[in-house]
Amino acid sequence: MQAAPEEEDHLAWAQERLAELGDRVSYANPFWYAGSFTIGLFAGIGGDRGNLGFVVETERQVEEHLTDHMDRLPPADARSRAIVAAMRDDEARHGAAAREAGAGELPLPVRALMRATAKLMTLTAYRF
Ligand SMILES: [Fe+2]
């Protein structure tokens, strides 16, 4: 699976575009890296099916998040829109690949917790 290097590309694209726009990434970024790493460790406990299920759910939620961004980006900002659209395509493929590899469906409370965590991250990003 090509997912990991593609996620690194996404971070680089975002950083580059923010620099072009004279903006920066959130100060909370290092905490999210640490948090994501920890969550990844726990996801590993679920075995392959659970692990892949986590990937499927993450990609699904990220895809929704990016679609929401597309709706809110200025129509004239073609460059940002192209970047977000390319990310969304990649995420859709990552999710499909994980499903094909035998992902299991995560329990509802886990999915809800993931959604709550993501919400917290977005809210923090807008403020700091
Ligand atoms: Fe992805």
Image (cartoon, rainbow, N blue to C red):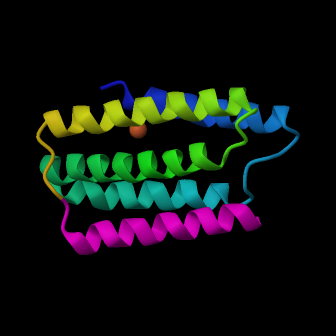
In the displayed structure, would residue 105 be above or below residue 84? below
Residue lying furthest right: 22
| Residue drawn at x 28%, y 53% as measured from the top left | 54
Q: Which residues are magenta?
A: 106-128
Q: Is residue 23 left or right of residue 25?
A: right
Residue 117: percent from the left, percent from the top? 47, 68
The number of discs equals 0
Residue 118 rendering spot, x and y as whole percentages: 49, 63
**Residue that protrudes farthest toward the bottom in the picture:** 109
Q: Is-magenta flag for residue 19?
A: no
Q: Which residue is drawn at the image coordinates 50% and 45% (left, top)?
A: 67
Residue 126, position as x, y percentages in the image: 71, 62
Give the quarter of the image for residue 21. Answer: top right
Tell me what residue is drawn at x 68 percent, y 44 percent: 73
In front of the other: 94 or 34: 94
Q: Quadrant of the N terminus?
A: top left
Residue 90 falls in image quadrant = top left
> Which image quadrant: the C terminus?
bottom right
- Residue 41 position, x and y percent, is 34, 56
Residue at the image position 61 percent from the left and 29 percent from the top: 83
Question: Of 32 and 41, which appears nearest the observer?
Answer: 32
What is the magenta segment's predominant secondary structure? Answer: helix
